Amino acid sequence: VRYLDQLSQRVRLEAHRLNGLIRFRVLKNGLLYAPVEPDFRILGYCADHFKTRLTSRRWILHDINRNEAMYWDTESLQPIDVDQAFVEHVRVHKEVPTDNLHNDETHYQELWQAFHSSIANKDRENKELQRKFMPRRYWKYLIEQP
């Protein structure tokens, strides 16, 4: 029983962490897309989280390792298949192909990076604490790249 309780806590913690670290990209068709590589199968937990927060937007939450994706069409949440060439590009390059991104997405990513670097206080930087709350394995799909 203790093992199952500890495993349940680890799954909940990872889902909680990723809910705060998932970064959506806007694709050309206005669809939001977020790649993730969780250790556990938590796509359903995260999808429920975003379903209540992004109710009026269409989005895809994609587990790259398991090639599982959840699609929210503003009314229902459903599993979908993602194009294999797209998946392979994201897996190799750790980013969505630029020809699939909305015209303004690159600009907004640059703004986000500038904002993140301008609010960072180098004197108060604590890499050990940062890695505790945001492990390095989650960094690859962050726009601000710590």
Image: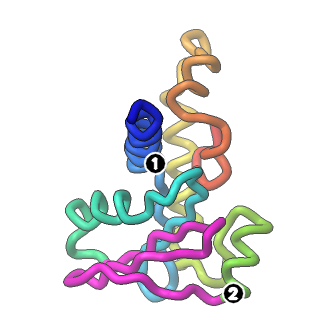
**Residue 82 relative to residue 42: left or right:** right
Q: The C terminus is located in which quarter? A: top right
What residue is shown at x 20% (from left), y 83% (from top)?
Answer: 75
User: Which residue is more in the foreground, 140 or 2?
Assistant: 2
Q: Secondary structure at mark 2?
A: helix
What residue is shown at x 79% (from left), y 67% (from top)?
Answer: 92
Q: Amino acid at mark 1?
A: Leu
How many labels, in total?
2
Q: Which residues are magenta?
A: 58-83
Q: Where residue 95 sits: x, y (%)?
A: 68, 66
- In the rendered image, which residue does mark 2 sit on? 84
Q: Amino acid at mark 2?
A: Gln
- In the rendered image, which residue does mark 1 sit on? 18
User: Hey, which quadrant is residue 127 in on the image?
Assistant: top right
Q: Where residue 9 sits: x, y (%)?
A: 40, 36
Q: Where residue 113 sits: x, y (%)?
A: 57, 46
